[in-house]
Image: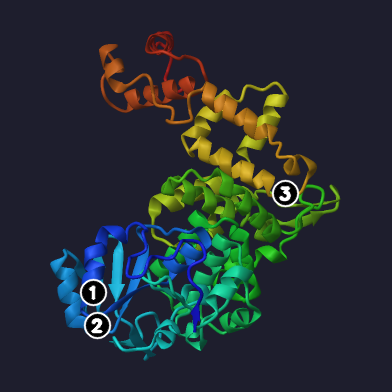
Amino acid sequence: MTGPPFALHPPPAPGELLDLPPLAEYRSVLEDIRRHGGRPLLVGGCVRDLLLNGEFQPLDVDLEVQALEPGTLRAILLSAGGHERGKSFAVFGLGPLEFALPRRERKTGPGHKGFDVEADPDLPFPLASARRDVTINSMGFDPWTGEILDPHGGRADLAAGILRHTSRRFSEDPLRVLRVMQFAARFCFAVAPSTIELCRSLDLSELPRERLWGEWKKLLLKGRRPSFGLRFLERCGALRFFPELQVLPETPQDPGWHPEGNVWEHTLLALDAAVEFRTGEEEFDLALMLGVLCHDMGKATTTYYDPEKDRIVSPRHEPLGVAPALSFLARLTNETRLTETVAALVARHLAPHQLYKESLKGLDVRPALRRLALKVDPLLLERVARADHFGRRTKDALERNFPAGDFFLREIQALELEEKKPAPIVMGRHLLAEGLPPGPEMGRWLKRLFQAQLDGEFDTLEEGLALFRKWRPRPPGD
């Protein structure tokens, strides 16, 4: 029922607390709990992370307190400056630590709120931990003795790289399908066949959007190989709850351009490639990863074999991919700014390649670049396009060569578009000083001058006003 002393850290001396932040900061509180007869155990993901990495995130440290009445635990933690998070569940927060009593849960109805929960300080650890999702999250660790409590084989599964449901109680919350998804992506673990079969029977349609989004965000922001998580969704049949993804494995691609196979295979490769372009800034990274995930959704309805070209084509899949992308995103989030950004990326993800081809013909693409920057973040677009390119199995992609992206980056840097959109140089106040009264005519002049600016006809205010003076005798629409 228990494991050997901790392997990745020297075990604490008898009676001493393991010297790991943030436990040491709250030593007096933890020792007070022990003096009153309680046994604080580290539980859940922090034990998993200790075994994997020898440390855990300070914002994700859960403790389960055995053998202590709720009132006593409450008094100790509130006097130390803690606060109650779940009154009926006896859950308390103290800085980065979350304390809870063992509890019994009984499924009483659908959804994540359909549970009858009862705190039970005397519930044995094997029973208390059986409600946890997967075995690698079902271990406990005593920070005073170094003892690992592992009644469900989590340590062996961790060593083998296996995600396995802790008990049949896994099926009480269908969100756990998506938890397995993001764990597979984050740790690059395989999923036990028995867990895949169990997940086949679970209905994700009852889950609220905010819960779905929480797990998808972890896959996108933390996943080392997002493809591991999405392949699991495919294998357990859960893609049926995301029909915009479900059709991608059935959508072929021309083998000359995409020797890796269908759109699904390409999307998974591109998503894994995009991981290296994440910056750590959440807004940018979510847009990047979602842009890559959704970029070829339009191919499902535009792909066909063209006998004249003797190849598979997907004309206009960029603009026609916006609708399925928005439909997919609406299932996950109501963040308008994010969905608009992703839609803009989907609609223009081939632009860096197209502009590069035009430049090779000797065409000046700077006006098009300036106009493009008004509609989409060019740095973000380049990252999506690069991931798209690296998601293929052509020779240049395997060698990590993307000359179109390199060209695109050089040009937007030369035009100083990497951090700001083009803004009009000539403003209304300038035309007022030239004697032009406010009104529709001024609006037309401002629009015409801004288009000339985007076309590169002037770069300074003086040049813009000189052009205005030259043009003004003519009708504005000329």
Cα–Cα span, label 3 and label 1: 57 Å
Residue labelled with disc 1: 33
Quick one: SS at disc 1? helix
Q: Do the residues labelled 1 and 2 touch (CB within 8 Å)?
A: yes
Indicate the secondary structure of the residue bearing disc 2.
Answer: loop
> In the image, is 372 to the left or to the right of 391?
left
* Circle 1 Cα neighbour tier, 10 Å, few/some/many (<14 / 14–19 / ≥20): some
Residue 349 visible in the snapshot: no
Q: Which mark is residue 387?
A: none
Vertical arrangement, residue 55 with respect to residue 209, above or below: above
Which secondary structure lies at badge 3?
loop
Return the disc, 3 or 1, that comes first in the chain's sequence.
1
**Residue 81 picture quarter:** bottom left
Q: How is the image coloured?
A: rainbow
| Residue ID for mark 3 | 392
Whole-angstrom CA distance, mark 3 to mark 2, is: 57 Å
Q: Nearer the viewer, residue 320 or 414?
A: 414
Expressed as whole percent of the image width and height from the top left, the position of residue 104 reads 35, 88
Amino acid carrying mark 1 in the image = Ile
Q: Which of 272 and 102 is in front in this view?
A: 102
Q: Position of residue 152 (x, y in %)?
A: 52, 82
Q: Which of 45 and 441 is in front in this view?
A: 45
From the viewer's perspective, tell me whether residue 136 is left or right of residue 67.
Answer: right
Number of marks in the rendered image = 3
Instruction: Nearest to the eye among marks 3 and 1: give it.
Output: 1
Q: Contact, CB < 8 Å: mark 3 with mark 2?
A: no
Residue named by callout 2: 68
Q: Is residue 297 above or below residue 404?
A: below
Q: Which amino acid does label 3 sit on?
A: Arg
Q: Disc 1 or 2, which lies upstream in sequence?
A: 1
